[in-house]
Image (cartoon, rainbow, N blue to C red):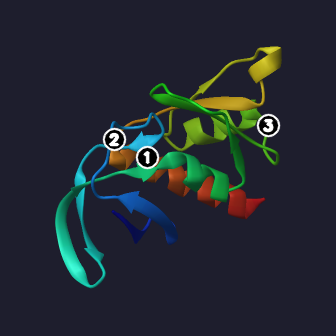
């Protein structure tokens, strides 16, 4: 059964309330109270996919079945993205290697960490 729930940056994402195994690009730490079709559903595990949120912000995200994503922006080089996030207390990995130089490696963390990451990415994209 799928329902539409608005979370993070006002994006509407389809979330399954009877979820199979967790995908690697999913925020999983914590729970939220949401309203689905006018009815409060409490203590629903947080299952907001990070991939569509990053893509909505203009990032290219490589497929992943691990606990991390490789993401890049056409607007900000990987090294600069890494440095700017680090200056704001957000730690991602960046590798100065030809094939992945434009990407940052984002390890999926707690809900709080992922919201902070999305907030910083959103702010950076608006500044461009």
Asked whether 11 or 95 is in front, the reply is 11
Q: Residue at the spot x=58%, y=53% of the render?
A: 52
Residue occupied by mark 3:
77
Q: Residue at the spot x=73%, y=61% of the render?
A: 127
| Earlier residue among tags 2 and 3 | 3
Return the residue found at the far front.
1
Which disc number belongs to residue 110? 2
Asked whether 54 or 94 is in front, the reply is 54
- Residue 3 position in % (x across, y down): 38, 69
Q: Residues within 10 Å of mark 2 (few under 14, many from 20)?
A: some
Q: Is residue 39 above or below residue 10?
A: below
Q: Real-space Cα distance between discs 3 and 1?
A: 21 Å
Quadrant (top left, top right, bottom left, bottom right) of the N terminus: bottom left
Q: Real-space Cα distance between discs 2 and 3?
A: 26 Å
Quadrant (top left, top right, bottom left, bottom right) of the C terminus: bottom right
Residue occupied by mark 1:
114
Secondary structure of residue under mark 1: helix
Note whether residue 8 is visible.
no
Return the residue found at the far top.
97
Which disc number belongs to residue 33? none
Note whether residue 52 is visible.
yes
């Amino acid at each position: 059964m799928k329902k539409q729930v608005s979370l993070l940056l006002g994006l509407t994402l389809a979330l399954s309330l009877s979820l199979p195994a967790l995908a690697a690009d999913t925020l999983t730490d914590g729970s939220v109270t949401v309203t689905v079709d006018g009815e409060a559903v409490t203590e629903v595990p947080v299952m907001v996919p990070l991939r569509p949120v990053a893509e909505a912000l203009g990032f290219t995200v490589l497929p992943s079945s691990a606990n991390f994503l490789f993401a890049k922006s056409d607007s900000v080089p990987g090294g600069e993205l890494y440095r700017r996030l680090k200056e704001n207390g957000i730690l991602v990995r960046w590798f100065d290697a030809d094939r992945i130089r434009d990407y940052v490696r984002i390890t999926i963390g707690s809900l709080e960490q992922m919201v902070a990451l999305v907030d910083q990415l959103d702010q950076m994209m608006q500044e461009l």
